[in-house]
């Protein structure tokens, strides 16, 4: 159980990849992790690793695009802790690669919902909690090295970054600091889908990137 004085970090996409690595890194800095992801089993594995390090987490298996659920989660955070020191948004929906002329309407809709609408709702739902702690929010930019076949992912990621940059300028007045960070290429499942056959040994481990990116903020 956490105490009222604990630092609270909400991490989306926490079940694997950079999100999971960020959750574990924050544990080492004394944060209680509210870990959001859709995969219950992977969240439980994350919880085991966090507990093995002496940390604690609240697991929230939820689809980030479910605004009603996210409102309730943020309300619960307010009722229990009254604030949020840090929000790390690592969740992303990566649609299948295809030519721009062959974009599937359902893939586009799902990408817009997962990467744009859900991000806008996340900002709205967490802003009061972050404001209460004069907290920080973290987003991750992803400049795709190949423009071919990345239209659906690229345009929704760019829109997500536009949202983040607008909030970055606006939130200063309320004491919230918004960071937009750029990770090095990592051996994530999403990248494996984009670049099959790539030498994964040449990529930077997620744990190393989490440490590099987050340490200056903590």
Image: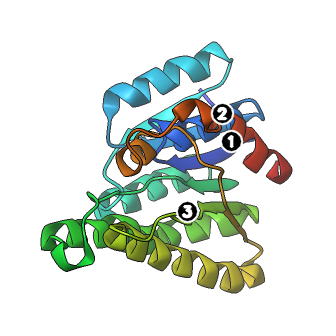
Q: Residue at x 51, y 17 (%)?
A: 48
Location of mark 2 (residue): 207
Q: Give the color scheme: rainbow, by chain, secondary structure or one colour.
A: rainbow
Q: Residue at x 61, y 56 (%)?
A: 87
* Element at label 1: helix
**Residue 2 position (above or below residue 98):** above
Total numbered labels placed on residues in the image: 3
Can residue 160 be seen here? The reply is yes
**Residue 74 position (above or below residue 210):** below
Indicate the quadrant where residue 135 lies: bottom right
Can residue 4 be seen here? The reply is no
Q: Give the crowd class for mark 1: few <14, some 14-19, many >=20 residues within 10 Å.
A: many
Q: Residue furthest top?
A: 52
| Disc 2 to disc 3: CB gap under 8 Å | no
N-terminal of the two: label 3 or label 1? Answer: 3
* Image disc number at residue 142: 3
| Disc 2 to disc 1: CB gap under 8 Å | yes
**Which mark is nearer the camera, 3 or 1?**
3
Location of mark 1 (residue): 210
Q: Is residue 44 left or right of residue 19?
A: left
* Element at label 3: loop
Name the spot of residue 24 as percent of width and height, x first: 63, 31
**Which mark is nearer the camera, 2 or 3?**
3
């Amino acid at each position: 159980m956490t105490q009222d004085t604990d630092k609270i970090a909400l991490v989306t996409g926490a079940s694997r990849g950079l999100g999971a690595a960020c959750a574990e890194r924050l544990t080492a800095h004394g944060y209680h992790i509210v870990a959001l992801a859709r995969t219950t089993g992977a969240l439980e594995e994350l919880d085991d690793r966090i507990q093995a390090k002496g940390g604690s987490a609240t697991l929230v298996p939820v689809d980030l695009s479910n605004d009603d659920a996210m409102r309730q989660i943020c309300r619960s955070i307010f009722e229990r802790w009254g604030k949020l020191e840090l929000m790390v948004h690592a969740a992303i929906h990566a649609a299948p690669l295809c030519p721009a002329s062959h974009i599937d309407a359902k893939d586009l809709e799902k990408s817009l919902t997962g990467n744009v609408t859900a991000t806008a709702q996340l900002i709205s739902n967490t802003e009061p909690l972050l404001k209460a702690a004069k907290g920080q929010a973290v987003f991750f930019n992803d400049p795709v090295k190949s423009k071919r076949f990345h239209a659906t992912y690229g345009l929704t990621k760019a829109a997500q970054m536009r949202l983040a940059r607008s909030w970055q300028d606006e939130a200063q007045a309320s004491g919230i600091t918004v960071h937009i960070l750029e990770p090095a290429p990592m051996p994530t499942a999403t990248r494996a889908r984009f670049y099959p056959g790539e030498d994964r040994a040449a990529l930077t481990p997620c744990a190393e990137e989490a440490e590099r990116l987050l340490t200056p903020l903590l």
